[in-house]
Amino acid sequence: MIGFDEAKEKYAAFGVDVETALKKLAPVKVSMHCWQGDDVLGFDSDTLTGGISTTGNYPGRAKNPEELMSDIDMALSLIPGTHKLNLHASYRITNEKVDRDKLEPRHFQAWVDFAKERNMGLDFNPTFFSHPKAADNLTLSNPDKCIRDFWIEHGKVSRKIAAYFGKELGMPCLNNVWVPDGYKDVPADRLGPRKRLKESLDAIFAEKYDEKYLADCVESKVFGIGVESYTAGSHEFYMNYAAKNGLMTLLDTGHFHPTELVSDKISSMLLFNERLALHVSRPVRWDSDHVILFDDELREIGKELVRCDALNRVFIGLDFFDASINRISAWVVGMRNMEKALLYGLLMPNRELQKMQDEGDFTELMATMEEIKTLPFGTVWDMYCAQQGVPQGKNWFNEVKKYEADVLSKR
Ligand code: RNT
Ligand code: ZN
């Protein structure tokens, strides 16, 4: 490849071995979220609730399992590496009339077959929204015991389904609990809902599963649309809950106040926990779930994961949903950017930079960090795409345009 040897030399001058970086990136799995393909609608409801929202009506949305699978395949053909697919319970594939509390592994068999054929892993999420029993954004913390019990059952069957995925695919399936529970306006009781949420979670997590197959995590949030004043499952709630119960915390990059950065939280989490889960998203002024760009924060996350030697300890999942652009392009841009950020982190002379910091040489630290920014990163990225057999540069976009003309435009 033109310029690759020169790029290697330029990195080597900073003490970075490009070949080693490429080798380390290849096995890293990113979990691609199925819900970017259909605006988070799933196959068991036709509205999206839960205080989250998609905007836009770009034509060609996948409306059934066949279309979604075909679109996922299209995206995967343009993304380097072998990854995982992240499913929500609402994406069950069955003709039966089965409610969320009665779901079983067999209702997801088509996805298991899909993943097996593609050598992928699966991750899972119980769906505590877009359902009549979640209409008021109160599920596991609902004051009504009947409603709570329904959602507890859903949480339990979801873990069973996730464990089945893990066993069938031979790698742990991350099962992520996120509930929309909260209040629009200033609540009179903050403790009560959190107490009920805690008890519901205790019931869901009571059964023990083999860690080889199931990895349990809980996702916190600061607010949602219509749930602006109070969220039962706040960060403090879940970080404490996870720590006490040996579960994993999931940090969604859109679930903190706008000037808080998840890149700064990763090292603290990893210091006290063996594992961590991420939902990488891009909040623009709020938890807007924009497609992730190759921006400062994404690069900082990539750098942190490498510096903390955490590529084996962190479950990296994406979580964005943009309905205003071609949805396959959204996946490809986001997945490729996540990979780029990891490669960027792997191409840093981390030990040398750390030494400069420890020796108090902040002048050289700044000078070096700035010079690294303009090293020929693009050439190394192109090489990675070539090695992985996917299009280099913008060539992938022609494929998306062709698919749009041949397939999406006919829907
Ligand atoms: C919502 C959470 C949650 C969802 C998905 C669809 O704020 O981020 O992870 O986006 O489960
Ligand atoms: Zn999320």
Image: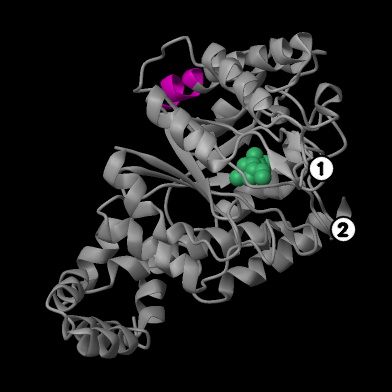
Residue 277 appears in which quarter of the rendering? Answer: top left
Within 10 Å of disc 1 (Cα), the crowding (few <14, some 14-19, many 20+) is: few
How far separated are the C-alphas under marks 1 and 2? 30 Å
What are the residue bounds of the magenta stretch?
163-170
Query: What x and y, as percent, mark residue 130?
Result: 81, 32
Numbered tag placed on residue 266 in the rendering: none
Decide whether the magenta segment is chiefly helix, strand or loop. Answer: helix
Location of the N terminus (image quadrant): bottom left
- Amino acid type, callout 2: Asn
Secondary structure beneath disc 1?
loop
Secondary structure beneath disc 2?
loop
Which residue is at the front of the view, 54 or 256? 256
Q: Where ligand 1 lies, by quadrant?
A: top right
For disc 2, the marked residue is 57
Residue 287 appears in which quarter of the rendering? Answer: bottom right
For residue 51, above or below residue 2:
above
Front tag of 1 and 2? 1
- Amino acid type, callout 1: Asp
Query: What x and y, as percent, mark residue 296?
Result: 48, 74
Q: Residue at x 16, y 80 (%)?
A: 360
Q: Residue at x 61, y 47 (%)?
A: 73
Which residue is at the front of the view, 54 or 386? 54
Is residue 75 within the magenta segment? no
Q: Taking the image as drawn, is residue 371 in sight?
A: yes
Query: Are circles 1 and 2 on residues that touch, CB within 8 Å?
Result: no
Q: Is mark 1 within 8 Å of ligand 1?
A: no
Query: What x and y, as percent, mark residue 274?
Result: 29, 37
Within 10 Å of disc 2 (Cα), the crowding (few <14, some 14-19, many 20+) is: few
Q: Is residue 131 left or right of 256 when viewed as pictured?
A: right
For disc 1, the marked residue is 185
Q: Residue at x 38, y 53 (%)?
A: 266
